[in-house]
Image (tube, grey):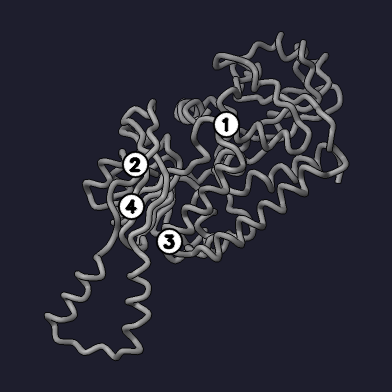
Amino acid sequence: MYMKLKNMMTAGTCLVLSAALLAGCGASASEAASESASSEVVVPEETASPEVAEDSYYPVSADTYTVSSDGATWTPVTTEYTAEPQRVVANNQGTANLLIRLGLADKLVGVAAVYGPAPEDVAEQFNAVPVIAEGYASKEAVLGVDPDFVAGRGDLFVDGDYGVGTTEELASAGIASYITHVGETGANFQSFLTDIDNLGVIFNVQDKAAELKAYYQDYVAALQSDERWAGKTTKMAEVSWIEDGMPVFGSAATESLQNEAFAMIGLDNINEDCDGSQVSIETIIAEDPELIVLFDYEGGPDMDEMIQSLYDNAALQDISAIKNKKVISLDFNAIYGGSGDLYTAMSDLADEFYGA
């Protein structure tokens, strides 16, 4: 779905669709000590101690990926990080949100793929981060801000106009990387928690990571146990884009993280079991979903107009979601950004669909 969104945005016709490092960052403790000795600067013992303690923490390792230059092949790797990253680029908005929630806003020197406003809890800090590309960032845009670390979606660690370059290319430039687990095949809520743990280790903020992880575990547990949908199943469908005035219902077979999130609030995504890039309207009519969702992004079509066009479409009038006016737009960044905003969006969707 990410690739389709990119293609449709480029053509201006979509409604919306829906890090693997081989090098560390910074100087080693021994290098720092050597530099101090050569310059004959005397450092008071009480000042030097914290620095020595911090340096002794690294190197650390985390499980991540490398991705082939065309994005087709993901390879799990265990990567060593030799120092705490200091100049970080997030290749998408959701990753930036996650890093900010881990207390790392001051490390961010760039963000890309900004398709909407930041959530309220991170807005002030997010808005202070330089946007290196409103859309997907090129390798040149990333190198232009001199990062020592790039994190985010694996499908963007590729060669091409919308890729930040492969992890190998970045490593050759002295830039470490982390590809988030939420983009892997079969990703789920545990994948998201793994990203929190790994980033906590990489940045030496394990206490903050543990706190954030516990927050989301409690949040998701509350979602799943809500009596409004617990033990129930309601059919839903995704509209991917509009083509010649007709909605296109794309396959969601690869969207395991999102499908799991929908299920947390009692929604069964009928697109999940459909092969191919498109699902026919006849299939949707036969399945008769009670909810249809669209994906909104900044600069995209007007959602109110798009929703009304579905309500007015004569070919869709037998679908329960159309008859009962249950077409709802969702924020693209929240659903596909790979941050905890996915679960906040589920809570908001549930309130709108079932009633608060």
- Distance from disc 1 to disc 2, alpha carbons, whole Å, reads 20 Å
Task: Report if the CB atoms under discs 2 and 3 are less than 8 Å apart.
Answer: no
- Distance from disc 3 to disc 1, alpha carbons, whole Å, reads 30 Å
Say whether residue 134 is visible.
Answer: no
Instruction: Point out the tag, 3 or 4, that comes first from the N-terminus.
Output: 4
Query: Considering only vertical position in the picture, is 138 above or below 26?
Result: above
- Distance from disc 3 to disc 4, alpha carbons, whole Å, reads 12 Å
Q: Is residue 101 left or right of residue 314?
A: left
* Three-letter code, disc 4: Glu
* Three-letter code, disc 3: Phe
Look at discs 3 and 1 and give the one toward the viewer.
3
Q: Which residue is mark 1?
A: 18
- Distance from disc 1 to disc 4, alpha carbons, whole Å, reads 33 Å
Task: Report if the CB atoms under discs 1 and 4 are less than 8 Å apart.
Answer: no
Q: Which residue is mark 4?
A: 80
Q: Is residue 25 left or right of residue 244?
A: left
